[in-house]
Structures are given as structure tokens and as C-alpha cells.
Image: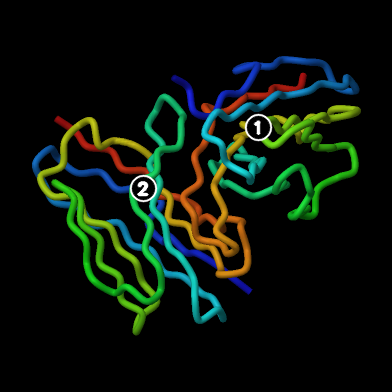
């Protein structure tokens, strides 16, 4: 059973398009995250939702909008894609205990290529 | 501000050698958590270990061991008798007590040659 799944695994699109990446977790966790890994492998948090509420919103362009329809799903919508958006996007989830420090389980990643 | 530094960009060893991956962190929190993740060539991120700031005991899991030293703000990872399957990028990460986000280091690419 896949714990954290993402679709699609690969996404190739033209500059200026709008695209979405979906994430689902079946671990019963309350908290979900989006991370971006750039071409140099650097990983950085973008957003986090806890029980469908946005709790972390790093300095990310407004073209990126997360949506959490329920606590098992966290989708990422990107408008007006730019070349610099090319990266691997990871979804993760964790079970909070009122503080940080819980293990985050990561999805397999979505490799986005903007041409 | 929180920061994680992995000064070793790439390490290459021959199989069966021992190798240590360094991790130095900065935080003002008194309670914090440290992690190691492995990213094999297939790309997924695999959790290896979590350590909280109050537990300075070293940990051993098979060929893996971790050395946490608050005095030097380091959380180093040693692989004993390395194997080709250990080839991966290894990330050290930090989170604070009141923050859910992981602050990652830049990663160390380990290549184990047969």
C-alpha cells in the first residue's frame, strides 16, 4: 500500500500553462506539506496544511496555490508556469503532536519540466 | 534563524570502507529535532533517523550509526562497511519545537564503488 502518493510522476508542459499536482496520503495524518527540490538537489518547504488549514506559507510566488479538500489530500496548482518552476515537487505528511519533530513521510515526487 | 550545513558535497569510497557524513546545525531553540534522510538514485526520500535535542545518546542500526554532539552542534552519520547500495544523496534536516517544517542541508552525495 502506498503511504503518500502523487500524480503525475512526470509533467512536461509549456511556459505560461497552468498545471496541478495531486497528493494523497492514507496514513491518517493531519499535516501535509509541499517541498520543492531544485536542480542542485536543494530541498525547501513551500506550504503546510494541518487539518485543512494553512499553517506554513513560505516565500512562494502567488502563482502557486495549495488546496486541501480534506486532510488526506493536498493539491498544488501552479498558474502561468515559468522556466524556473522546473523542479521535483515532493508531498509529505506527518502526525503532529502539538509540536514539531515528527517524522515526515514523503511521496515519490513529481518531476515538472517547463519548456 | 535555523540552518543546516553539510560541507561535504560529494564523497567517493570503495566498498567495505567506513564513511562519515558530517552535519552541523544552527538553531536558537532549546528543543529541536534532527533527522537524516536518504535519496537513492530512484529519487524517493527515505527516512533514516530522528533525534530530539534532549537525547544525546548515540544510536546504531545495523551498519548505520549516528553521533549527536550538542557541544559542537553536530549530528554525524557513519556507514560501516559501505556497500554499493548505499550510494545515494543523504540529507540532514532540522525542525524546531514549534515549527513543523524541515530545514534541509544541501545534501552529501555518496558514491560507493565496487
Which residue appears at 34% of the width and 47% of the height?
B48
Give the side of residue A104 with respect to residue A81, left or right.
left
Determine which residue is flagged by label 2.
B10
Give above or below for A101 relative to B114.
below
Residue A104 percent coordinates (x, y): 51, 46
Give above or below for A115 relative to A23.
above
Looking at this view, is B62 or A84 the one in front?
Answer: B62
Q: In which quarter of the image is the N terminus of chain A?
A: top left
Q: Which chain carries label 2?
A: B
Give the side of residue A69 with respect to residue B79, left or right.
right
Label count reads: 2
Q: Please tell me how crowded label 1 is: few (under 14), some (14-19), or many (20+) other residues with Cα within 10 Å.
A: many
Secondary structure under the numbered disc 1 in the rendered image: loop
Say whether marks 2 and 1 touch (CB < 8 Å): no
Give above or below for B72 relative to A38.
below
Looking at this view, is B96 or A88 the one in front?
Answer: B96
Which residue appears at 72% of the width and 46% of the height?
A49
Determine which residue is flagged by label 1.
A72
Secondary structure under the numbered disc 2 in the rendered image: strand
Residue A113 falls in which quadrant of the image?
A: top right
Q: Please tell me how crowded label 2 is: few (under 14), some (14-19), or many (20+) other residues with Cα within 10 Å.
A: few
Q: In which quarter of the image is the C terminus of chain A?
A: top right
Residue A24 falls in which quadrant of the image?
A: top right
Residue A10 percent coordinates (x, y): 63, 16
Q: Which chain carries label 1?
A: A
Which residue appears at 83% of the width and 37% of the height?
A64
Give the side of residue A93 with respect to residue A23, left or right.
left
Res. A33 mark: none
Amino acid at each position: 500500500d502506498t503511504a503518500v502518493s502523487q500524480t503525475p510522476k512526470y509533467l512536461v508542459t509549456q511556459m505560461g500553462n497552468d498545471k496541478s499536482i495531486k497528493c494523497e496520503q492514507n496514513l491518517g495524518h493531519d499535516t501535509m506539506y509541499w517541498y520543492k527540490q531544485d536542480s542542485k538537489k536543494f530541498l525547501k518547504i513551500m506550504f503546510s496544511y494541518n487539518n485543512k488549514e494553512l499553517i506554513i506559507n513560505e516565500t512562494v510566488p502567488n502563482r502557486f496555490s495549495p488546496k486541501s479538500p480534506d486532510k488526506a489530500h493536498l493539491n498544488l496548482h501552479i498558474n502561468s508556469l515559468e522556466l524556473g518552476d522546473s523542479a521535483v515537487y515532493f508531498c509529505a505528511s506527518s502526525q503532529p503532536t502539538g509540536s514539531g519533530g515528527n517524522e515526515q513521510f514523503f511521496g515519490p515526487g513529481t518531476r515538472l519540466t517547463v519548456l | 534563524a535555523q540552518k543546516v550545513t553539510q560541507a561535504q558535497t560529494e564523497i567517493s569510497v570503495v566498498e567495505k570502507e567506513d564513511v562519515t557524513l558530517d552535519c552541523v546545525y544552527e538553531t536558537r531553540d532549546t528543543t529541536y529535532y534532527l533527522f537524516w534522510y536518504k535519496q537513492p538514485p530512484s529519487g524517493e526520500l527515505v527516512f533514516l533517523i530522528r533525534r530530539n535535542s534532549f537525547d544525546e545518546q548515540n544510536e546504531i542500526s545495523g551498519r548505520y550509526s549516528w553521533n549527536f554532539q550538542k557541544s559542537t552542534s553536530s549530528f554525524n552519520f557513519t556507514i560501516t562497511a559501505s556497500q554499493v547500495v548505499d550510494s545515494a544523496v543523504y540529507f540532514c534536516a532540522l525542525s524546531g519545537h514549534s515549527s513543523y517544517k524541515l530545514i534541509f542541508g544541501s545534501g552529501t552525495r555518496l558514491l560507493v564503488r565496487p
